[in-house]
Image (cartoon, helix red, strand yellow):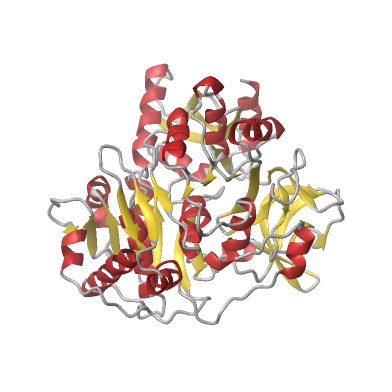
Amino acid sequence: MLEKALSFSELQQNFSWNIPKHYNIGVDVCDKWAGRQPERLAIIEHLAGSTPRKITFGDLKEQSNRLANALQQLGVNSTELDGMPDRIGVLLPQSIETAVSHIAITKMGAISIPLFMLFGTEALLHRLRDSEAKAVITNTEGAEKILAIKSELPKLKAILSIDDPCKPGVQSFHELCSKESSRFTPATTRANDPALLIYTSGTTGNPKGALHAHRVLLGHLPGVEISHDFVDRDHDLFWTPADWAWIGGLLDVLMPALHHGVPVLAYRFEKFDPAMAFRLMHDYRIRNVFLPPTALKLMKQVPEDDIVKCAVRSVASGGETLGSELITWGKRVFGVTINEFYGQTECNMIVSCCGALESPKAGYMGRGVVGHQVEIIDPERAEILADGQEGVIAVRAPDPVMFLGYWNNPKATEEKFVVVKGEKWLLTGDMGHRDPDGRIRFIGRDDDVINFAGYRIGPAEIENCLISHPAVRLAGVVGRPDNIRGQIISAYIVLADGYTGNTSLAEEIAAYVKSRLAAHEYPRIIRFIEKMPMTTTGKIIRASLRKMAEKE
């Protein structure tokens, strides 16, 4: 844990990485504390319509051990014939069972795949088929989706549901666990062994799986601690509305908090309610919260006379630029500086503000976090740029928080890096510059990824889904600027013969995408056009579509 300092420079002088040869995420966030203080509170679960549940680290260890034994009985192994651990999907909302699942899988030495509950069947099919997942842990809602595509997943051997009773083809999570021993010997994993496979969207092709090692949690810790004005182990309590299926919920909140022995509240809105968020933070006396910018913007719309005061000690936010107005509002309402941080699924928590050390500078997202060397690079000339020059934000490799590579995609992995004077650098794909004091300014995306409410969404997956609709001949998807969500998804469609563009058809197509991909991935705006702007090689010119969107 970082010791409090008076400045970033003091932090840097006192910092050095301590990455052990052997390290296991599940052991670190669970068994470590179960051995020291088994009665220490780990998770409070608040589900709508249910009595809140609490679980200690001791019980967390016992339950994850039972699940690990159950999965092994089902034939899930830490190593396949090709030497790569088995992959297990976790399709659950924030809950105790979600934490138990990730802990059990990592203790086994297998690879956990976080999956978003709002994913439709096509999105799930790609991720589970691409990863060749052997099992999925889910609930009734998720099990129905998996059963619908199971015939197309030859590697999938088991579906476990945390809800009873279970449909044919689905096994009871709790019944299987109840039959197993509470004793389990965790795998002796190395820090560099794979542990998590998190799918992220790009501009071309289907979403890519970013494969992370066990060390990724250790790599997150400095950024998490700095963005929360350090950690008060004995008094803090973390919460985020961000789903634990995303890196922002799983590795920015849940796992780091458990690493430090700090409890976490599990509560996920079906639809984010800004007034209820204030009430929740008040009722549970939340001390540390990660609020994505879109959540903050919605909370800002709540009349201040209606806001229930809360006792937060730290507010962190990342995913898109906040702006000085939102930070000023946060200071007035929360009484603390909202600390902006930056990163991406492949290399997260690498830049951050820290209100405990200095006031934020308007328009700048913070400094490179201690332990991570962040520079502005010109990849074409393979050189590090001087302060004030615009280029691509890059991180020097190797780095504990950096991914191992894209799953089954060495070409995309290679394209993610550039060599500068003999050193390897990961390119974020985002443009920025650094001021003379070392603060980094985010300028814009260097690709076509749409930033909707903090989600980075690739247009290709949506376009592929759109053109599977019988009315759609061609489809191009871009982001249109939006004051609340950053960008909203806009689709430009050339219709197939025999169809006429109207409001009814637009609504039908939007619902079609929503049901097959995810609730955050369907186009909010659909425009019918006569001709798609394309290059001579047949590629959609999204820049032209963006100009059309900006004019609306």
Q: Residue 88: x percent and y percent?
A: 34, 64
Q: Residue 525: x percent and y percent?
A: 50, 26
Q: Is residue 101 left or right of residue 427?
A: left
Q: Quadrant of the C terminus?
A: top right
Q: Is residue 256 left or right of residue 441?
A: left
Q: Is residue 137 above or below residue 486?
A: below
Of residues 168 and 265, the one nearer the viewer is 265
Q: Is residue 180 above or below residue 249?
A: below
Res. 110 in view: no
Residue at point 52% right, 59% down?
233
Residue at point 33% right, 80% down?
185
Q: Residue 431: x percent and y percent?
A: 73, 47
Of residues 496 and 14, the one nearer the viewer is 14
Of residues 128 and 303, the one nearer the viewer is 303
Res. 219 in view: yes
Q: Is residue 401 above or below residue 521?
A: below
Of residues 501 and 127, the one nearer the viewer is 127
Give the image quarter of residue 1. bottom right
Q: Is residue 314 above or below residue 155?
A: above
Q: Residue 244: x percent and y percent?
A: 43, 51
Residue at point 25% right, 45% down?
141
The count of marks equals: 0
Q: Is residue 21 left or right of residue 470?
A: right
Q: Is residue 328 left or right of residue 386?
A: left
